[in-house]
Amino acid sequence: MSGESINGGCHCGNLRYTLDWPDGGSEIPARRCGCSFCRKHGGIWTSNPDARLLAQIADPSQLSRYQFGTVTAHFYICSNCGAAPFVVSEIDDTLYAVVNVNTLEKIDSARFDESATDFDGEDTDSRLERRKKNWIPDVTIAFGQD
């Protein structure tokens, strides 16, 4: 099956992305994180180790990066509209990412294979290894207008 390009971003359009998904039309895993941050921000995350994320931050002055807990990931949050479209984690000089399915555009939510996750008690090394295995390893983030 061929891949597809899925667009998405924050509500106001300052943080935009294209997600090159390897299996066009297939189910999209959607992991509902149980941490307090994700619950409060509607974080339901997807990734595929064969996907590619191309992100564009139009106005970097309207970008907030937030870290908590293990301080191993940056949540990209639009300071203007408050949406958190993606999270990145730099591991061994490689940038990995997950995307919030709530920020995908023109995708039928019936494609989401949603499950709950809980990473409480996971040590930092195990967390980073899980990300290297499951998160998107091909990430490009551009700043400013095209």
Image (cartoon, helix red, strand yellow):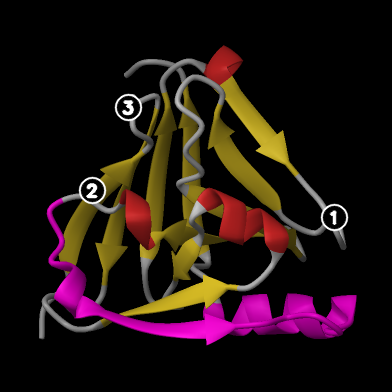
- Whether the magenta-drawn stretch holds residue 119 is answered as yes
Q: Residue at x 77, y 79 (%)?
A: 127
Q: Are marks 3 and 1 in contact (CB under 8 Å)?
A: no
Q: Residue at x 49, y 68 (%)?
A: 136
- Amino acid type, mark 3: Gly
**What number of labels is visible?**
3
The answer to whether residue 5 shows anywhere in this view is yes
Q: Nearer the viewer, residue 26 or 56?
A: 26
Question: Which x, y percent locates residue 55?
Answer: 41, 41
Question: Residue 71 got which mark?
Answer: 1
- Whether the magenta-drawn stretch holds residue 135 is answered as no
Q: Residue at x 34, y 40 (%)?
A: 9
Residue 63: image quadrant is: top right
Question: Residue 7 got which mark?
Answer: 2
The answer to whether residue 96 shows anywhere in this view is no
Location of residue 85 with respect to 72 vertically, above or below: above
Q: Quadrant of the C terminus?
A: top left
- Amino acid type, mark 1: Val
Q: Nearer the viewer, residue 134 or 79?
A: 79
Q: Nearer the viewer, residue 117 or 8?
A: 117
Q: What residue range appears in magenta? A: 106-134
Question: Which x, y percent locates residue 91?
Answer: 74, 64
Q: Residues within 10 Å of mark 1 (few under 14, many from 20)?
A: few
Which residue has dot 3 on it? 13
Task: Give how far apart the Cα atoms at labels 3 and 1 are.
Answer: 27 Å
